[in-house]
Image: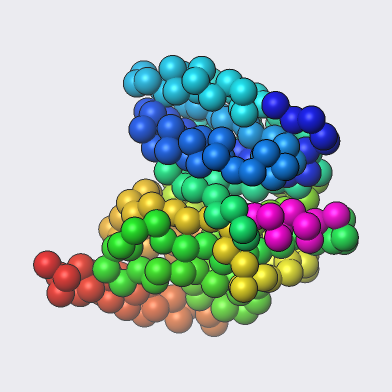
Amino acid sequence: MNRIAAKVAVIIPVWNDAEALDCTLSQFQALDSAVLAQLEVIVADGASQDETLAVLGSFAAIVSHVDSQKDDGVYDAMNRGVSNVSAPWIWVMGAGDIPTEEGLKRALDILPYAESDAAHAFAVGSDGEPEPGVPHTWIPDWGYGMHWRNTMHHQGLIVPSSWLKSHPFSSAYRVLGDYAWCLDRLKSGQTVHCHSELMVAKVSSGGLSRTFTPALYLEEWRVKMGRVPLPTLLAHLVWLSAKWAFKLCSRILSM
């Protein structure tokens, strides 16, 4: 696919979600050829039993590498994708997520002049009407606010490949492994430049992180243990319950 050296590896984990993958790859295929040539598209499939492999076959011209095997969840799949990266930057999308061409063009223009050991975060929008209590746009914020809520979303985060190769995602988490990874990078003092004026992706409603169940908030508690200051962690006994109640009430009021 690429006529010039790719700047950014796009990793797309998928499992039994052929329709969403088709949507995502169609949007990448529709990008301006000069933009697409700078991307190394890698799909990590968890041995899907639906039409996923057939979809991948129809996009062979734009997909640089496919890895299809049983895995230990989405973060294991992401890590397999990372192992096949040759580009200097990594951007993790998902089946159903779509790139926004103008924001992506400007992001690609930033990277050649960027310091090699800093990441870049961009805004992420909702593709359609989001769930009750969920914003239409997520604005990146790299700082103390991360201790309270995830203000970084992997669809808007482009990181040096070396970061993920040396510090892979933990597959101990089902939903919030990328949040745990970001908190670890924040704690270690790594730099992320935020570009809130640029939107590089839109995400569809649904997905594991948008099912606001008690299990999700229990996982958030596990993620924050050892990663946020103890007083903040103790405050989360109230904070996480309040967040769950807010999402629950928002859903009920929208019915």
Please name the residue shown 59% across and 43% down the image: 31
Give the tally of numbered discs: 0
Please name the residue shown 76% across and 47% down the image: 89
Can you give x and y, in whole percent of width and height, for residue 230 in the image?
57, 77
Can you give x and y, in whole percent of width and height, for residue 62 in the image?
62, 28
| Front residue of this view, candidates 108 and 30 | 30
Q: Residue placed farthest to the left in the image?
A: 255
Display coloring: rainbow
**Is residue 75 visible in the rendered structure shown here?**
no
Kindly indicate the quadrant of the structure image that contains residue 182. bottom right
Horizontal side, residue 250 vs residue 110: left or right:
left
Please name the residue shown 50% across and 75% down the image: 148
What span is in magenta?
104-112
Please name the residue shown 70% across and 26% down the image: 1
**Is residue 197 visible in the rendered structure shown here?**
yes
Q: Is residue 15 above or below residue 92?
A: above
| Front residue of this view, candidates 28 and 7 | 28
| Front residue of this view, candidates 109 and 242 | 109
Kindly indicate the quadrant of the structure image that contains residue 190. bottom right
Magenta stretch holds residue 109 = yes
Horizontal side, residue 195 vs residue 172: left or right:
right
Horizontal side, residue 165 vs residue 154: left or right:
right
| Front residue of this view, candidates 150 and 98 | 98
Magenta stretch holds residue 201 = no
Can you give x and y, in whole percent of width and height, for residue 16 in the image?
37, 28
Kindly indicate the quadrant of the structure image that contains residue 151. bottom right
Can you give x and y, in whole percent of width and height, for residue 97 in the image?
47, 47
Q: Is residue 49 above or below residue 121?
A: above
Q: Main secondary structure of the magenta part?
A: helix
